[in-house]
Structure formats: C-alpha cells, structure tokens
Amino acid sequence: MYIVGIGTGGYKSVYFIKEDGKVYSVCIDSLSTNQMEIKEYNYKNIVNITGGSFEDEYSGTLNPIFIDIDGNIITE
C-alpha cells in the first residue's frame, strides 16, 4: 500500500497492489462520506507507486507514478 498526494489541494489516496498484480486506489478524504469509490487500474507488473509532479501545465499538481518490474514509469 502506498499513500500518494493528489492534485493541488492536498488530497491523499491509498494505492494498493493485490497479489494478482491488479492496482487499485481509494481517496482517503472520502472515507467519512458515502461517496467512497475504489478505482481499478489496468496496469501490469507494478512493483512501486509514488507521487510526484511531472506536468508543466499546472505547477504543484501531484499525481501517482507507477513503476513496473522492468523500471518503466507510467503516469496518468
């Protein structure tokens, strides 16, 4: 499980990799509401998930960065 900051507002999401290799996330800030949604990603062989800012368009915007078993970096 990995906690990653999202966007510019300081929201946090938990990303997790299940034993079958599927990647999911849920926004921590929605846990106290009825709008909690678990999102599934279609990525394979992910071994690490971190957060970072990689967009030039919006300064300070954080997004998840997925790293696969071969060292490839996948961004949304």
Image (cartoon, rainbow, N blue to C red):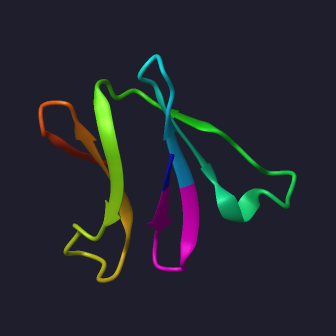
Image vertical order of residue 74 relative to residue 21, above or below: below
Q: Is residue 61 above or below residue 18?
A: below
Image coordinates of residue 18 in percent, x first then y, are: 51, 27
- For this orientation, the residue located farthest to the top is 20
Q: Residue at x 29, y 83 (%)?
A: 59
**Residue at image x 56%, y 65%?**
12
**Residue range of the region highlighted in magenta in the rendering:** 3-13
Indicate left or right for 62 with 19 as reference.
Answer: left
Of residues 65 and 70, the one drawn nearer to the viewer in this rendering: 70
Total numbered labels placed on residues in the image = 0
Dominant secondary structure of the magenta stretch?
strand
Query: Looking at the image, which is closer to me, 17 or 64?
Result: 17
Return the x and y of residue 71 as percentages of the image width and height.
Answer: 13, 39
Instruction: Give the quadrant of residue 67.
Output: top left
**Where does the image place residue 72, in percent across and percent down from the top left?**
13, 39
Q: Is residue 25 above or below residue 28?
A: above
Residue that appears at 56% across and 57% down: 13
Left/right placement of residue 47 relative to residue 22 reads left
Whether residue 9 appears in magenta in the rendering, the answer is yes
Query: Residue visible at 23% across and 35% down?
Result: 68
Q: Name which quarter of the figure residue 60 lies in.
A: bottom left
The image position of residue 55, as x and y in percent, is 23, 69
The magenta stretch spans residue 26: no
Name the one closer to the observer, 34 or 19: 19
